[in-house]
Amino acid sequence: MKYIVQEQEHGLDNPHREGLHHIGNSTHWIVFDGVKILTDPWLAEPAEHMLIHSIPPIPLPIDPDIVLISHEHDDHFDPEALSRLDKAAFVVAPEGKVADAVEKMNFSELYRAKPEDSIEVRGVIIDVVKGKHNVPELCYRVKSKDNSFFFGGDSMVTKEIEQMADQEPVPFVILPGEYSSILGFRFVMTPEEAVLLASRFRAKQAVLTHHEQLNVGAWWFRWLVRINKVPNSKFPDWFSVPKPGDYVQFPWDQNNYESKEAAIN
């Protein structure tokens, strides 16, 4: 039986501040050129009968402008979490059963996404690219006039993602990086692959995602699905490993801050 995770008491200090605010696992609150974007909201556990939050998330913000859903797994597509959200949100969900389920939740706008789509909504452009997992997965590049970021869900590296990385620099990327496996077969990019992919995007700042989960299933679930903790030392200084409630500034905002400080001094 599922239950709603006990969220931490303290929520976001400033939910309107530009940058990434880490909620928990793959759930991020991203304020990008004034647009509030929520990724893969998750509250109900155990997901897939075995996964719980290894660290309690902070309270889920409920008024996003856009919601991005990467794939159907419970820790990325959670109807309980979605039910809390303001129905004025624009939801981008993979076409098929995920989008069909979202349609029944009465959001004002739903986009049934597929690879190579490009969506212009709420002042940003969302480019959809094919990921790779043990179920169909989508990843997203979000662009404004001057800046962009990439959200990689819990995908492996694909030729399509590599081609996107080669198209143009993306200064801010959100990527998984772990050694998880099913029967010995990997289904998420490794830390080494994540660092190389961030470099291929020519990112100035990377953020780890999908890194706060614990397998509490029956012994045979734990034998089937291995989730190994990855030490922070696997990631360089420019690759943040956030905890729930942490804030990560966009690199372009950091540059503006440093310029202002230099001018003052």
Image: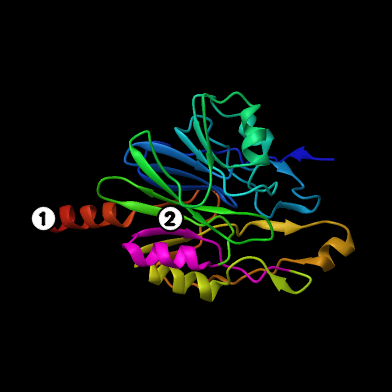
Q: Residue type at mark 2: give it.
A: Phe
Give me the residue at 21% from left, 53% from top.
256
The region drawn magenta spans 157-181
Q: Earlier in the sequence, mark 1 or mark 2?
A: 2
Mark 1 is on which residue type?
Answer: Ala
Quarter-of-image position of residue 59: top right
Residue at the far right: name it. Answer: 219
Q: Residues within 10 Å of mark 1 (few under 14, many from 20)?
A: few
| Rendered residue at 60%/23% (across/down) | 106
In this rendering, position of residue 115 left or right of residue 212: left
Where residue 42 appears, as percent x and y from the top left, is 64, 43
- Residue 159 — which label? none
Q: Nearer the viewer, residue 153 or 46?
A: 153
Q: Is residue 187 visible?
A: yes
SS under mark 2 = strand
- What is the crowding at mark 2: few (fewer than 14 residues within 10 Å), some, or many (at least 20)? many
Q: Is residue 58 above or below residue 153?
A: above
Please tell me the numbered disc located at residue 150: 2
User: Label 1: which residue?
Assistant: 263
**Nearest the camera: 34 or 200?**
200
In magenta segment, residue 118: no
Q: Which is more foreground, mark 1 or mark 2? A: 2
Residue 95 percent location from the top left of the image: 59, 42
Q: Is residue 13 visible?
A: no
Q: Position of residue 39 (x, y in %)?
A: 53, 45
Give the percent coordinates (x, y) of residue 102. 63, 33
Q: Residue at x 52, y 73 (%)?
A: 193
Please, is residue 84 above or below residue 94 in the view? above
Q: Is residue 50 left or right of residue 161?
A: right
Q: Quadrant of the C terminus?
A: bottom left
Is 162 inside the magenta-drawn segment? yes
